[in-house]
Amino acid sequence: MKKLLSVILCFALMLSFAVPAFATSVVEDVSEYPVLLVAGYSSSDLVMTDDDGNVSQIWGLDFNKVLEMVEEEYLKILLGGAKMTQGDYEYLGKFLGEAVLEVLEYMKCNPDGTSKYNVSTIVENTAEASKWSTISDEYRAEGAIMDEVFEYVSEDSVYLYNCDFRMGAMENAERMRILIEDICATTGYDKVNVLCISHGGQITGTYLSLYADDPMVNNCVMCMPAMGGAALAYDIAVQNVVFDENTLVKFLEHGFNNETDFHWLTAAQSLGFLDDLLAEAVPYICELLYTWSSIWDFIPNEYLDEVIDVVDADYYSEIIAKTKVFHEQIMANYGINLKTAQSNGAKISIITGCGIPSVTGLQQNSDAIIRTADTTGAVCAPYGQRFSDGYVTLKTSCTDATHNHLSPSMEIDASACWLPDNSWFVDGLYHGMENHDEYSQALMLKQLLSAEPLADVYADTNYPQFKTTTNNSSSVYAAFDNGAEGYLDSDDKYLLITNITTVSTIDIYDVTFNGTDIEVEDFMVKTVKSGNTIKLKIEGYIPEVSLVRGSVTISYLTYGSVTPIGTQTFDFTIMNGEAVAYDASNPYSDVDFVADVCDDVKSSPFASLYAAFAKFLEYINKFIELITSIF
């Protein structure tokens, strides 16, 4: 029971915060082409028509019906909860799994991937029906993102691609082509601007692959596209859904732009019971999902055979055959296909999150849902490691020796991307959080709606290839004063630290550099109000070398927060001379440095106060554990 209370408290506290919207004005000369939104997974509402012609909605779930089921079965749920307190998860897991199958009965497909029932999208796949101004509010997708788009274009020039998301990427790409042709015929334009998100990115990537010679696309922005699959789908398919609780809580904090750190909940109480419960429920849910072509298309290439081995391959032989065509012809050839589409007029931009482990199962560089390698084609170091100093990028896709496609954290080699000069990476940006990050949102709007979007990652220093998120839940943001963000050379004289909270005042009480012998000059505790930036002069020796990684850790106290003490670490690469020799026999190094407290902070009169306060919080946390144990 105490674990359940922790989860409920976590969600309740975070739901109490409003989500702010960012006001941006980044598009000066707006493109005249109509806009097509290809939204994320399960965004389209579906209906089923029975043999008598009766139509009923089967997706776009009516949660009142779900609540009715809960009310009808509350005794079973209570019994299952009681059994869970004794370590028995099978009863409640079986109940939940069977309930999902009952609720989604009409979403079932046959073993060959065809729909078991007569299912269609509520919004028809025509220009007239899919025009934003025509669609009812309840059937619109990605509302928060689209509100920003409508600051520049009217609802009459925006269209929504609606898909049966159970179907495969190739089938949906063909339907997308039909809609684009109808939009062009209706509007008189020969192209559209496309904004695609997550699953919509896989559909659009497939469309651009199939029709690369005549893409009918002007600007195309792919936000965290699931082109190479999704780690979450693999975890479900092999029935290994194991939550990374810390990542899950951070995901929610970023989604609600929450400035209070609730990680203590995961430290105080393990949420592992969710894993045990899901382990019992997932096998039932997989009976449904194994028949959806989209789930098979979400499996990353290198894991497809493993998934085939865990199912009855004969029973699912037809759907497996279809997904193999997709994997071999489309997924394995994005590098060629997207460049061909580019050469035929499509101006493609990819924006992705990185630097986060998967929320379940696979611990690899990702945006918590999709691996960074699967959104961009980049090569990444194993999670928790980086490429060793002196690393030489592969240059398998970009061969220009003057281009530096190595991330400041030295964890991502973007020279191997499908589109290395048109892929942007935002460290710490969680999946689906584009409109919760001012930089990502501005870049998305600029590349989608501009008559002349940025040609590449070098076109504007305000939009570097590698950026750290400014989601206000991170509280602080740091960068050097000169040159590209994330890189340090002898021209850098100051460290700039910004309070990116919306209302809080913070105290910066420690600045620790790692990997290089520099420090902040005459540092004392600095108070920074919301939205303000301070300049701290750096002193010490910056080595006259390049391709050496460093980091700076900012420790701070947030006024008025129930969890006031926090830290943020920012990676950088020293680029200040000849590159150091790379030891290919030791390709990776650990990410973490051993952080030493600055000497001047040790001697600060405030240091003992902060240390005492931190100890006080530890006792408070232990007290919370004691109280919750009573329950």
Image (cartoon, rainbow, N blue to C red):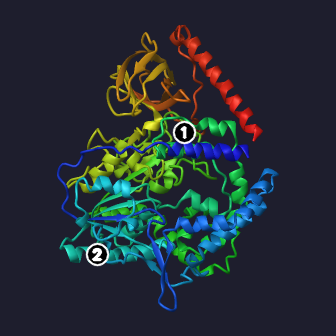
The answer to whether one can see residue 11 in this image is yes
Q: Nearer the viewer, residue 586 or 190?
A: 190
Place of residue 22 in the rendered image (x, y in percent of width and height, measured from the top left): 33, 43
Which of labels 2 and 1 is toward the front?
A: 2
The type of residue carrying mark 1 is Arg
Place of residue 380 in the rendered image (x, y in percent of width and height, measured from the top left): 52, 47
State the residue position of label 1. 386
Q: Is residue 3 left or right of residue 233?
A: right
Residue at 59% across / 73% down in the picture?
Answer: 104
The type of residue carrying mark 2 is Ala
Report how many numbered discs are placed on residues in the image: 2
Place of residue 269 in the rendered image (x, y in percent of width and height, measured from the top left): 69, 40
State the residue position of label 2. 127
Q: Is residue 262 left or right of residue 519?
A: right
Above/below status of 207 relative to 79: below
Quarter of the view holding residue 539: top left
Residue at 78% across / 54% down in the picture?
Answer: 82
